[in-house]
Image (tube, rainbow, N blue to C red):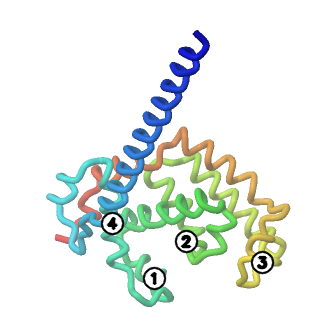
Amino acid sequence: MFASLFKLLGCTGQAKQSDNRVKADTLNKQIGKSIEDFNNRPIYKILTTQTIDTTSDNNLLQTVFDNLVEKCPQDYTKEYQTVLGWTKSQQAIFIIWLLESEVNNGGYNQFYYNSSGQYAELATGALKLIGALKLADLTSRANQIYKKDKEKITKYQDGTSEGFSKSYDDNPLDKFDDEFYDLEKKENLQKLQVNFIRNHKQDFIDK
């Protein structure tokens, strides 16, 4: 009896392991396909009304951002002036993308540290434009703290990864990161931006 039970348990265990391997293989294939699809996505140097109208909501924001990146000069020192020459709608999508990606990756500290920080003052208006009023208020407050405590925040930022890491110690911007992550659940930036693009598509088309 015990031998039969052990045999049954052994078979069950093998079946579970096999099932887990199948699930893992399926997940890896899905991830691989997603990466492949992303790398092979169409990037439009010229954005038309038809492109916007026929692009799904899931892909529209990426499509518009890719188009804006194509408009950026190779010389990053000229990027800011180039962006200022765009429509307010284009500026908003570009700046919000930078803000969201930086804060989600390394907080407001990283946003200000990288070249994205040059758009800090414009970010508040960009968020207001698409209707993300709470995130606009949050970013405005973060900007004020950064200005006030910039010397303390950037004290160890000497261009090295060690110095950047140390700048997170007792950083007054930390509290804004948690609030940003919480507000993102209430103000869906992707949905707000997609709706904004569809309602202002004339500001994004090239012809």
Mark closest to the chain's N terminus, 1 or 2: 1
Circle 3: residue type = Gly
Q: Is residue 28 left or right of residue 148?
A: left
Is there any visible trace of residue 46 in the rendered image?
Answer: yes
Residue position marked by numbered label 1 in the rendering: 79
Q: Quadrant of residue 113?
A: bottom right
Q: Amino acid at mark 2?
A: Tyr
Q: Amino acid at mark 1?
A: Glu
Q: Mark 2 and mark 3: span between their CA atoms?
A: 23 Å
Vertical arrangement, residue 28 with respect to residue 14, above or below: below
Which residue corresponds to mark 3? 163
Nearer the observer, 163 or 136: 163
Comparing labels 4 and 1, the label whose residue is closer to the camera:
4
Q: Kindly report which numbered mark, 1 or 3, lies closer to the viewer in this rendering.
A: 3
> Quarter of the image containing the N terminus?
top right
SS for callout 4: helix
Residue 119 got which mark? 2
Label 2 vs label 3, nearer the camera: 3
| Disc assigned to residue 153 | none
Few, some or many C-alpha atoms within 10 Å of disc 2 (few <14, some 14-19, many ≥20)? many
